[in-house]
Amino acid sequence: MVAFGFIVAILGLGLLIFVHELGHFVIGKALGLKITEFFLGLPIGRALFSRTRGETTYGIKPVLFGGYVKFPEFMDIYQTEVKTIEPDSPAQTAGLAEDDQILEIDGQKVKSWLDIFNTVKTRAGRTLDIKILRQGLEEVISVDIGSKKDAGWLGAGPDSTGGITIEDLPVTMEGQGFIKKTLVVVAGPAMNILLALMIIVGALLIGFAEPTATIDKVMSESPAEKSGIKAGDRILSIAGKKTPGWQEVTSEISKNVGRTVGVNVERS
């Protein structure tokens, strides 16, 4: 019985974790955020099954416990060093290189890739003078800004993995305001609460079985058989004491060992 309870607890915890992550996933998608992975199971080992639809990979991991959702992250977004250059981008065409540090754009100092993005996004089709620091020396290069996703496109970013560039900022968690970030974060526990409410409502609709002392089997030559008790009878009382469940039946029998007592039953 203890082992069964432990298994139920583990399964319940796994369900809570999965539903929690599902909340992040659903709200993230609803807000148009970029989500790279959504898996059933712990994020360890190779996937047993996976399929990519759009920008998101869905699948099942070997350890079927909980689940996880993965939002892309920026690497070192709060500095201005170039770590990735997109092929055939304005940045590559102008000669911008990895490890260059962007200092100014059109004379305006920039302190992070957030500053760079906010400066570039409104200047599609324009030529910008970008001051960089390369191998300890400052120089200025001219970049003809392109257009992508209805915003100015530089084609460079802080992510050395190449998985995401600064132009993707509007669809990442980093690019969201306080309200949207809060909605995504709160969605997880909100789904847990919703699951709990659904379980409670379901239990109320189904109803709880009342504990009863119903006879399943009568042993041959037993006092019960000799007294005429049959399988299916429900014991209502023993010696005038009500017996709503088997705990009360056992208690009354132990109190009246060796005595003849009246047993009131309900026969279906």
Image (cartoon, grey):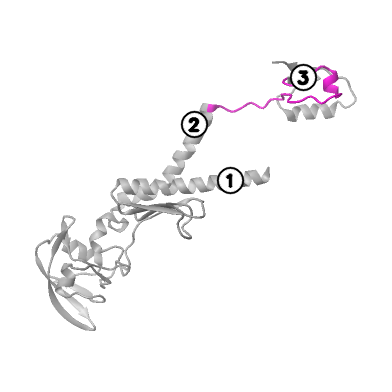
According to the picture, the residue beneath numbered tag 3 turns out to be 230
- Asked if residue 121 shows in the view, the reply is no
Disc ID at residue 200: none
Q: Residue at x 71, y 27 (%)?
A: 245
The location of residue 44, given as percent across then percent down, is: 48, 60
Residue on which the image places disc 2:
201
Dot 3: what SS? loop
Label 2: element kind: helix
Residue stretch in magenta: 206-232
Q: Earlier in the sequence, mark 3 or mark 2?
A: 2
> Amino acid under label 3?
Lys
| Main secondary structure type of the part rendered in magenta | loop
Residue at 41 percent across and 47 percent down: it is 22
Q: Is residue 100 above or below residue 169?
A: below
What separation in Å lies between label 1 and label 3 (alpha carbons)? 38 Å
Quick check: is 204 in the magenta stretch? Answer: no
Q: Quadrant of residue 85?
A: bottom left
Question: Marks 1 and 2: in contact by CB < 8 Å?
Answer: no
Residue under label 1: 9
Residue 112 x/y as whole percent: 25, 68
| Amino acid tagged 1 | Ala
